[in-house]
Amino acid sequence: MLILRKSTTLFLAVLLLISTSLLFSPAPVKAANGFYVSGNILYDATGTPFVMRGINHAHSWFKSDSTTAIIAIAATGANTVRIVLSDGSQYTKDDITTVRNLISLAEQNNLIAVLEVHDTTGKDDTASLNSAVDYWISIKDALIGKEDKVIINIANEWYGTWNGSNWADAYKQAIPKLRNAGLTHTLIVDSAGWGQYPASIHDYGKSVFNADPLKNTMFSIHMYEYAGGDAATVKSNIDGVINQGLALIIGEFGYKHTDGDVDEATIMSYSQQKGVGWLAWSWKGNGSEWSYLDLTSDWAGNSLTSWGDTIVNGSNGIKATSVPSPVFGGSSGGGTGGSDSTATTLYDFEDNTQNWLGINVSGGPWSVTDWATSGSKSLKADAQLGNGSQHYLFLSSNQNLTGKSTLKATVKHANWGSIGNGITAKLYIKAGSSWTWYDGGPVQINSSGTILSLNLSAIPDLSNVQEIGVQFTGASNSSGQTALFLDNVTVH
């Protein structure tokens, strides 16, 4: 009986120690099957550290240009796109269907989508922050299940005043509301002061982070003339966040702004050194006052500005530092050429045309050495352009693509000919006994190489694919002859 009492006492003591340990040292809860933060590192759903290298796109003001822009952003090699949305309080609301389509488009192009509500910019009232929170909850059916490919930037530059206490108090109320609605995504909180007052994070970031029951919140500084004006400021602002064990991105930055210069070189180099993500502002559409922040002169990215060349081709730019997330199967995430090491190559045209044919072509198709995105050959056909003229390269042959998620191909047009406002292309399949048409949407192509993508995941009858092809369409002001090229048709 004495032995029993001692055993019981020992058991209760051990149980008390375990309970006390759990009470005072809670393990961080990881978002199910999605991105999560641990210390100052963001991890993707595979457990791999993920460093954003990407570009902002102002969808809410240029809704009809988003397909072209997002595909072109992927072609730079970016691994992330930050998309401007509206909750309807100031700009035209982006509904749940629009958000679903944008997420799908980013996913098809191997881009992590950072979604943000822009109506809150510079505002101090909690009503505007709550409006953004209510918006995310209203469209949660488009977001839940996408935790591995979508990150929610709650409210763009909410709280314009340089005051950290009020900023923190509001977010400590907003974050639990999102969690209680079932949104487990990684959340991003912009600093106060129009995103340019990092002291708000330095002083109150820990308390905001601890208000998240999932401990899955990171922070963002927008580095313009105040937060990013010189090297010392850039480094101090970054260190002040990550040295606290908080995860950080530079959610926006330029090379100059209204009131002064920005040290973009240090932003990019120090971010690379410290493993901090960045998202350059912005692809296009900044208007005459801030047009110097446009990365490209055209939505398809055929004509990068000097700022765009720095971001894409600079020594610490996208091409040099961007690594795609393995959640996409290790693919390249878009680009102007190159192969996907995890994909199955269906057609590379190295030996012959592989039985591909052309419709409305004036010559070919041929297997040629004029250009190739992998290997040494591609498929080429000459085409006589006209007002909306359509030209096809295709293979009619029954194939089974069951279990495959994405079809890709790289295309281009020759750098000669009167293409007018440009040539668009669609990657398509025809499936089932009725040869039903499915395509990836029109993409404006260039003369160096453009990757087309078609999401197969929602297409029935993949066991009975009757035809794979590309439809090229000339602009209304195109004329005369050019050449069309196709290479590296892959599936994964």
Image (cartoon, rainbow, N blue to C red):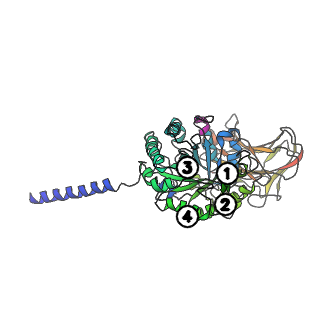
Numbered circle sitting on residue 317 = 2
Find out whether residue 95 is within the magenta segment. Answer: yes
Q: Secondary structure at mark 2?
A: loop
The residue to which callout 3 is attached is: 193
Compare marks 4 and 2 and give the one earlier in the sequence.
4
Compare marks 1 and 4 and give the one earlier in the sequence: 1
Q: Dot 1 lies on which element?
A: loop
The magenta segment: 91-99
Of mark 3 and mark 1, the one earlier in the sequence is: 3
Task: Give the residue type that dot 4 points to.
Answer: Lys
Front position among marks 1 and 4: 1
Mark yes or no: residue 452 visible. no
Q: Is residue 440 left or right of residue 52?
A: right
- Give me the C-alpha separation between circle 3 and circle 1: 15 Å
Residue type (three-letter) at the residue carrying disc 2: Gly
The 10 Å Cα crowd at callout 4, few under 14, some 14 to 19, many 20 or more, is few
Q: Is residue 385 above or below residue 196?
A: above
For mark 3, does the 10 Å Cα neighbourhood hold few (<14), some (14 to 19), or many (20 or more) residues?
many
CA–CA distance in space, label 2 to label 3: 27 Å
Circle 1 Cα neighbour tier, 10 Å, few/some/many (<14 / 14–19 / ≥20): few
Say if mark 4 contacts mark 2, CB within 8 Å: no
Q: Residue at x 45, y 53 (%)?
A: 204
Report the number of discs: 4
Of pointers 2 and 3, the one earlier in the residue sequence: 3
The mark that comes first in sequence, 1 or 2, is 1
